[in-house]
Image: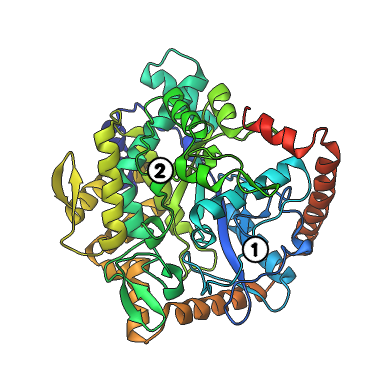
Amino acid sequence: MGANLVKQTTESLQYYHLPEFDPSWRAVKRGLEKESLRIGPDGNISTTSHPRALGSALTNPFITTDFSESLLEFITPAYADIDECLQVLEDVHRFSFQNLENDELLWVSSMPCPLDSDVEIPIAQFGDSNIGRMKTLYRHGLSNRYGSLMQVIAGLHYNFSMPESFWAPYQKICGHEGSIQDFRTEKYLHLIRNFHRYSWLLIYLFGASPAACKCFVQGREHGLDELDSGSLYLPDATCLRMGNLGYKSEAQKSLFVCYNELDAYAECLEKAMHTPYPDYETIGQKRDGEYLQLNTNLLQLENEFYSTIRPKRVAQPGERPLDALTTKGIEYIEVRALDLNPYLPLGIDAEQIRFLDSFLLHCLLDESPECNQTEFFEVAQNIATVVEHGRNPDLELSLESKPRKLVEWAHELMENISFSSALLDGEESDLHEKSRLTQIAKIDNPDLTPSGMMIKEMKEKNLSFFTFSMKQAGIHKKTFSEGGLSPETTELLKSTAAISIADQIEVEAADEVDFDEFLADWNGS
């Protein structure tokens, strides 16, 4: 095996025009953010408050809430070791299950549990501080703009960055003479452009939302077929979460966001955050003295822009994310196109992570032409096509305005990704290559994809989407309830939760202006 790996590494260096790939560069860092709905034993959404034993949703670094009090979000720090990252996510799951009340469990699918139209989805609360009230008001704005149902779809965000040791040597290889900050930002934008071009492949391989409960489309137009009396689906769908029923905004459809330069990206979002939008003006910012949304602009905040990937930087308290990006550059990227895999207790596993790393490294090292408006909307259409029909073996996508069969294009991409897999494996491992081969098998047999497995099982066993998801939720609850946490880990998570509650109280006590003044200043008025 050794001689073959040496040959693969040599070919990979030639493909990417690299003189070397230092072993330290393989220590890519990744962090996970995983959302899951809290549900009762009957499968209905929990309407109780965020469990106090899990700490403050505003300040706990491991456990927070997303849109709803019921939509938990588990966060890991960034790790160079995949197993360590997954272990932390598992520990947080185990700790949370120990502290859920009323025999609650976690919904395992990205598309939500059954929700009657008269059930009020509890919007996340972050306390009485100005920043906490703003976070809650932002969510009220999302509810008023798009409805609460869309906002309780769950996903998994994957944060990726190259190790610090990579950047200076790579800058020298590329002959870049500017600052290291500018170079890093330029290359992450390079990665993002390629990611957009090829993200349909991830949606095909890892999409796990081919069906939904009928209640999810109540009062909305849809083109879904009936799977059974309670479920809707599309026969070849992969990831309805990323389609018209999921994370989509009619208002943002015409928004062309360019990733050629950071300033252009920031300018586009800044403009959207300061451009009034008629439908949102109709809602109004306030009614009867109560705020309804942060403002009436196309975007309340930069985070409202729906995208499969985001350039990111850790912002300081009180600092706007976009300001942090433009002043200090891109620090890492956040992949947002991933469904929860209901067959996996954590929604993701090491094999998937290894392929994601290979895919992202290829996006970083391969050629990446600047994007333009025509390509931007072509990419969006490719994603929409794969979302609804990805497992059709005869499916065609569009590449430079010409038809291209998905299967052929996918195999070509996989061949190219073999070079990044070889670099990450080096000459002593083949784990990334094995993961790549596993994905190739899915291209040749769509039934091996998570979406294909789900539809096949639901049809063969006569399971509704609800019954299937409840079955998996029960299996995973048993997994997390067995064994347990070490006393040291339990104490760490308990003390972190307690400290977070004290931290929230401090934040609330530190406010020096009332909320009206704070919000006006935040909106720049």
**Labelled disc at residue 122:** 1
Q: Residues within 10 Å of mark 1 (few under 14, many from 20)?
A: some
How far apart are the two marked residues, 2 and 1, measured between alpha carbons?
Answer: 26 Å
Disc 1 secondary structure class: loop
Q: Is residue 98 visible?
A: yes
**Labelled disc at residue 252:** 2
The one nearer the camera, 354 or 512, is 512
Please state the horizontal and vertical placement of residue 94, each as a whole percent of the image. Answer: 67, 67
Q: Is residue 425 visible?
A: no
At horizontal 51% and vertical 81% (from top left) the residue drawn is: 471
**Three-letter amino acid code at disc 2?**
Gln
| Vertical side of 399 occupied by 229: above or below | below
Horizontal side of 260 relative to 273 (left or right) equals left
Quarter of the picture holding the C terminus: top right
User: Image quadrant of residue 12?
Assistant: top left
Please state the horizontal and vertical placement of residue 402, each as a whole percent of the image. Answer: 13, 43
- Mark before the other along the chain sequence, 2 or 1: 1
Please state the horizontal and vertical placement of residue 35, each as a whole percent of the image. Answer: 56, 59
| Vertical side of 482 occupied by 94: above or below | above
